[in-house]
Amino acid sequence: MDFGQDYYELFGDYREERVPFYMTYPMSNPFLEEAEYERDCRRLQQLYQKDAGHIQEIVERECDKMEYDGSMMFDEYPDRLLFRLLCRNIYRELKGEESENQLTGMDCTNPFMQLIEVMLAQEMFRRRCRRRRCCRRY
């Protein structure tokens, strides 16, 4: 069936604009999106002050140790006591205290402890979201 020259002048030659069937509805790649989220997070973390950047490095190192199946980081309701103990361990590492008995300066009103708690909660939240977005559901 020939539609004639008038049809192609009005609507164009559709044969030149063909795309493969899998490109008609492009799917988003969650791993590329996750890489963009990670780059954006790193860019913003570069704006941290020197002390906060050092705390962030220690917090990331502790979260790397906890990133496994069954970790308290991925519990639906993380335990507050374990969270506080982890913050105290980070504080001890930050201050270089070797003794477990030295609990001075680790109350909840200490600004460094509050900063550590906030940064740890943020890092745990970021990793939980990443796990939810990127984990495969079979």
Image: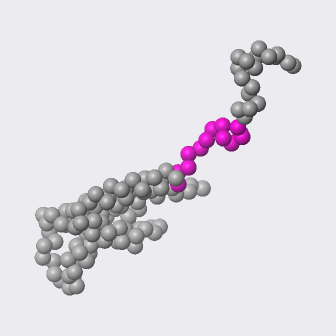
Color encoding of the figure: one colour
Query: Is residue 11 in sight in this rendering?
Result: yes
**18 is higher (above) or lower (below) than 110:** above
For this orientation, the residue located farthest to the right is: 1
Q: Quadrant of the N terminus?
A: top right
Toward which corner of the image does residue 6 lie, by quadrant?
top right
Q: Would residue 10 be found to the left or right of residue 96 on screen?
A: right
Q: What residue lies at 56% left-to-right and 57% top-to-bottom?
A: 136
Nearer the observer, 107 or 60: 60
Bounds of the magenta segment: 19-31
The location of residue 12, given as percent across then percent down, is: 72, 23
| Count of numbered labels shown in the rendering | 0
Q: What residue lies at 22% left-to-right and 80% top-to-bottom?
A: 96
Would you say the magenta stretch is mainly helix, strand or loop? loop
Toward which corner of the image does residue 48 lie, by quadrant?
bottom left
Is residue 25 rendered magenta in the image? Answer: yes
Q: Quadrant of the C terminus?
A: bottom right
The location of residue 18, given as percent across then percent down, is: 72, 34
Q: What residue lies at 56% left-to-right and 55% top-to-bottom?
A: 137
The location of residue 78, given as percent across then percent down, is: 34, 62
Nearer the observer, 32 or 72: 32
Q: Would residue 122 be found to the left or right of residue 37 on screen?
A: left
**124 is higher (above) or lower (below) than 25:** below
Q: What residue lies at 53% left-to-right and 54% top-to-bottom?
A: 31
Nearer the observer, 107 or 81: 107
The location of residue 49, given as percent across then percent down, is: 23, 62
Query: Is residue 85 in sight in this rendering?
Result: no
For this orientation, the residue located farthest to the bottom is: 99
Is residue 95 rendered magenta in the image? Answer: no
